[in-house]
Image (tube, helix red, strand yellow):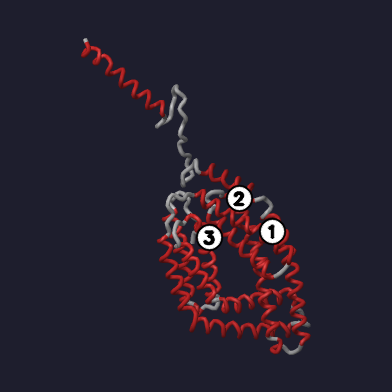
């Protein structure tokens, strides 16, 4: 699966190609959800990739097709959110168990794991019976809408501008999240990081060398913020269901482990965020445009394109140069001049 826009094709071709590939994969995973407990989580990843694509091209769409498709995919994701939360809570608990479980806490983590596994099974069963069919229908509508985008005379430069706006929002969200430390602000920052990461992948043809390192850094940051959010989800589940645990001491111990892990994740995210968002948006935009200008001198196979030479009023001149046309016209006049003179005599 090649999650990358072909920047040498019209947007009306490359955008539906990438989007349909992602949505087809999402539908395929959802249709297998009854037998695959990770299917919903995987399908939502395809949703996020498609939404990042649509966010990149939405400003270039002269109609409402992009906005409509994005709304359909968002709704499909919300239909599956309960199943997703149950799945990530299991993963977050496994992370805590690997880091904090010792002989004295093995029974506590065993109880937690059993409860979360049962919860995940119930959530998946409800999703299969009540939600997945509707989600598939929404995704199918969104897929059809990908072919209704009207890009007019939009170009790669419009996409670069949209990518810079995503970068700017992520930088602003980082400052707010680090200042407040609130789970909601950190989650919003994570969403912007994910979108920047995926848009970097979509545009990596324009800056192949830097895109590889930048996307790796953004993914690592996204993973840290994602686990921080998953632990917040797990915390809410534990606090809302204290009665399922053997004692208040068990609950307090788990909450303490969550706090410690989140603090470590936040410290790591702070350092990586400063690296990812080190540049101001204007400088980032200028460098991204410079990458594209350099690349636009080569074709999609990496071969150098013939540069159009300026008219120098003396040879040698490149094909299509104005002075070449003038010389040709002058030669034609000279060839006809003797004949013209004879006619006049």
Nearest-to-viewer mark from 2 and 3: 3
With respect to residue 15, does 248 lie above or below? below
For residue 116, what is the image quadrant?
bottom right
Q: Position of residue 5 (x, y in %)?
A: 49, 55
With respect to residue 93, does 224 lie above or below? above
Question: For the point 55% across and 51% down, which residue is it?
Answer: 161
The mark found on residue 148 in the picture is none
Residue nearest the observer in this picture, 68 or 11: 68
Dot 2 corresponds to which residue?
A: 210
Crowd class of label 3 (few under 14; some 14 to 19; many from 20; radius 10 Å): many
Total numbered badges shown on the rendered structure: 3
Q: Residue furthest front?
A: 63
Question: For the point 31% across and 20% down, which residue is it?
Answer: 333
Whether label 1 touches label 3, CB < 8 Å: no
- Distance of label 2 from label 1 (alpha carbons): 17 Å
- Element type at mark 2: helix
Dot 1 corresponds to which residue?
A: 273
Dot 3 corresponds to which residue?
A: 55
Residue nearest the observer in this picture, 102 or 311: 311
Crowd class of label 1 (few under 14; some 14 to 19; many from 20; radius 10 Å): many
Which sits earlier in the primary sequence, circle 1 or circle 3?
A: 3
Q: Position of residue 273 (x, y in %)?
A: 69, 58
């Amino acid at each position: 699966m090649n999650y990358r826009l072909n920047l040498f094709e019209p947007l009306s071709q490359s955008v539906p190609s990438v989007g349909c590939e992602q949505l087809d994969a999402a539908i395929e995973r959802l249709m297998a959800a009854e037998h695959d407990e990770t299917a919903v989580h995987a399908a939502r990843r395809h949703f996020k990739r498609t939404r990042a694509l649509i966010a990149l091209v939405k400003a270039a769409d002269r109609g409402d097709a992009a906005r409509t498709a994005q709304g359909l995919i968002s709704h499909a994701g919300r239909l599956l959110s309960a199943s997703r939360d149950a799945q990530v809570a299991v993963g977050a608990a496994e992370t805590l168990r690997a880091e904090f479980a010792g002989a004295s806490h093995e029974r506590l983590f065993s109880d937690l794991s059993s409860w979360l596994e049962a919860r995940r099974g119930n959530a998946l069963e409800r999703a299969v019976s009540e939600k997945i069919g509707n989600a598939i229908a929404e995704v199918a509508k969104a897929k059809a809408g990908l072919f209704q985008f009207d890009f007019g005379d939009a170009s790669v430069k419009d996409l670069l501008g949209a990518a810079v706006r995503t970068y700017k929002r992520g930088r602003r969200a980082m400052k707010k999240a680090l200042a407040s430390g609130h789970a909601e602000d950190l989650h919003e920052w994570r969403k912007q990081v994910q979108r920047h990461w995926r848009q970097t992948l979509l545009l990596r043809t324009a800056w192949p060398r830097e895109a590889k390192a930048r996307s790796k850094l953004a993914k690592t940051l996204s993973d840290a913020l994602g686990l921080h959010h998953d632990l917040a989800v797990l915390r809410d589940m534990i606090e809302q269901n204290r009665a399922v645990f053997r004692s208040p001491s068990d609950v307090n111990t788990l909450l303490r482990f969550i706090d410690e892990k989140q603090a470590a994740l936040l410290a790591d995210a702070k350092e990586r965020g400063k690296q990812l968002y080190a540049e101001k948006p204007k400088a980032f935009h200028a460098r991204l445009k410079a990458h594209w200008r350099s690349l636009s001198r080569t074709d999609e196979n990496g071969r150098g394109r013939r540069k159009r030479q300026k008219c120098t009023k003396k040879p040698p001149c490149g094909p299509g140069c104005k002075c070449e046309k003038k010389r040709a016209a002058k030669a034609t006049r000279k060839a006809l001049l003797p004949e013209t003179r004879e006619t006049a005599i």
